[in-house]
Amino acid sequence: MNEQVATVAANERRLTIARAMAEAIALEMRTDPSVFVMGEDIAKLGGVFGNTRGLLEEFGSERIRDTPISETAFMGAAVGAASDGMRPVVELMFVDFFGVCFDAIYNCAAKNAYFSGGNVKVPMVLMTSTGGGYSDAGQHSQCLYGTFAHLPGMKVVTPSNAYDAKGLMTTAIRDDNPVIYMFHKGLQGMGWLGTEPGATVHVPEEAYEIPFGKAAVVRKGTDVTIVGVGMGVHHSLKAADKLAAQGVSAEVIDLRTLVPLDRDTVFNSVAKTGRLIVVDEDYKSYGVTGEIIATIAERDVSVLKASPQRVAYPDIPIPFTRPMEQFALPNPDKILVAYENLKRARTWRWL
Amino acid sequence: MTPTREQKFWMYRNMLVSRFHEEVIEQIYLEGKKPVFNMANGPIPGEMHLSNGQEPCAVGVCAHLKPADVVTSTHRPHHVAIAKGVNLNKMVAEIFGKKTGLSGGRGGHMHIFDADVNFACSGIIGQGMGPAVGAALSRKMQGKEGVAVAFIGEGAVNQGAFHEAMNLAAVWKLPFICIIEDNQWGISVAKSESTAVPDNSVRAQAYGIPGYQVRDNDTYEIFRVAGEAIERARNGGGPSLIEIETYRLAGHFMGDAEGYRPAGELDGLRAKDPINVMRARLGSEEGLTDEQDEQIKAECRKLVDDAVQFARDSEYPAAEEAMEKVFV
């Protein structure tokens, strides 16, 4: 194989989000001895969702620690270790399990910097799986983005593809604040879960950071802005393809991080298109969709040519049975319906 | 393990500073709250949990600790903070909500953090267990000097956090000590009504670790048992659990009428005030005279008075500083 071919092959290296996360962690662990991983089934199993695969073999059981099923204890321990000079990457297997350890998260991790006037840092990464679509019912399928993003003191990131997953993980580990890293099971590239092929993309081998608070305009357009997060980005891109077939030019924004939130990129896009659809697999009320719309309304509501639309999970617990769950989930067709509603919505008349 | 003369006087002085601190805070807390008690008023607003009577727990344990060791404490933290060496001026300023306080007024009396001596406390029962275990894990992983001690109340053993953290500390054999300050009361609920076993040290068996109960708020016995546990932890011997029978000589918080206390209980406890016990011991064992005692007390009072003056003289933070330090 000549050198040029080898370079091309390397450039085309595509990773799943799971492998991209593991690679980012491994790269940081090689250079920073304070980084370690703990959680349930993250060592020998490599994580239920594959994002710690291979780490035990390279780093050993001292730094890749299986924990008891004791989220309250090990989440609290992550706070204590982070305050004492370590950089724990701790896994909460399903975000739905937050209920048994939330005190350590939102009362300690999120507040200790503030309570100490900045004298105590809590540089921990809490990585946790989100999302449904595979009939795992209402305690293993939630997103809860808004729950975490609502509470001050935590940064919240939500990668939609493997390139972002690696860069956001690197940034998260290097950040001196608690970072909630919310990956979507349906984007993870696990063989046993249905997976979105668009999430598996080229990932450079070296470490790189993706800055927090910078949304990505993943598709340029002029007629309508579709804002998505995680799986919602892929729904949005598919809907944009279909809209393009109808002659509608949709701009798609991947928020990438919810805290900090890149309000400028969203606003500038909506100022250009005048129309806004927000797509979120988290519950509809009091969540990300409302926050995005409020961002526009607060800054300059006159940029809107029509009432914004949202495609989000209805305010119900997530049902098990396939027809009910699929009925409730966002999808590209619902975005098309939202666009029809947007067209029908009365155009604002400004005095 | 018995305390040296120097250690005895160290403990006595810290007990005195702690008690004088609580007595002064009590007086100041009531400023602006008479004749009508309103928690929001006065130079020290908010809840106030005083530690009068629990000083032996703090000094008996902290006599063995260095600044590098980690301590987490409770919503009733002052005695432990003082014994751990938290900066008194900054702590009192924090209690007043002043700019010169440990966090510049963001935390207050239930959220005292002093990174210089690795002290933290929090307002939720049992909350300090996990973080202390994590600090112990950090020390073990880094091969860094230090043990971690979580002070909790006897009510906290009925929290899930207690069980989970004890198991984690034991299964990972961490340099961790859990100190249960058993003051018999969870606000108004007696230990006998909340807890299935009279002696929580038996719970240590569930984790395969040593457990001890110290009776009667005995400073020397606390010193001995804690000293052995801390030494064991420093030498890689893993965690221990110690329950101390202590006395809450004040209400749960300021303003607590304590109608739930059996008649005579408080008088009985006051008769066994650990500061008087310590004073008597120092007299018989170390020849402490009344004159010397007055001198020590004056010095301890001055530390507290100076800290209070520092706090009173300090400015409040600019209100908009509230927006800072959410992230570092």
Image (cartoon, coloured by chain):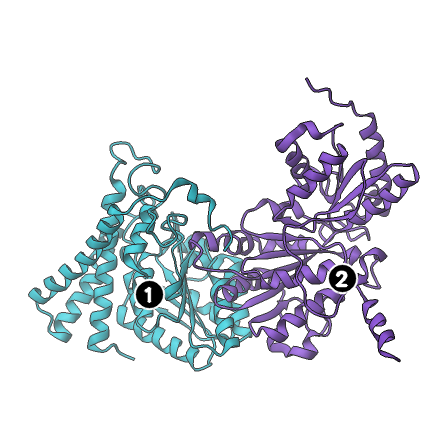
Q: Are marks 2 and 1 on the same chain?
A: no
Whether residue A113 is visible to the viewer of this picture, yes or no, is yes
Q: Residue furthest bottom?
A: B235
> Hey, what amino acid is under mark 1?
Lys
Which hue is chain A drawn in?
Answer: purple
Q: Residue at x 43, y 73 (%)?
A: B147
Q: Nearer the viewer, mark 2 or mark 1?
A: 2
| Label 1 element class | helix
Please give the residue where the numbered disc 1 appears in the rendered image: B84
Q: Nearer the viewer, residue B21 or B160?
A: B21
Q: Residue furthest left?
A: B291
**Vertical placement of B317 versus B9: above or below?**
above
**Vertical placement of B48 versus B116: above or below?**
above
Q: Nearer the viewer, residue A62 or B53?
A: A62
The mark total stands at: 2
Which hue is chain B drawn in?
Answer: cyan
A160 left or right of A97?
right
Protein chain holding label 2: A
Q: Which mark is residue A17?
A: 2
> Hey, what amino acid is under mark 2?
Ile
Q: Position of residue B259 (x, y in %)?
A: 32, 42
Q: Quadrant of the C terminus of chain A?
A: top right
| Label 2 element class | helix
**Vertical placement of B292 versus B75: above or below?**
below
Whether residue A41 is visible to the viewer of this picture, yes or no, is no
Q: Quadrant of residue B156?
A: bottom left
Protein chain holding label 1: B
Q: Quadrant of the N terminus of chain A?
A: bottom right
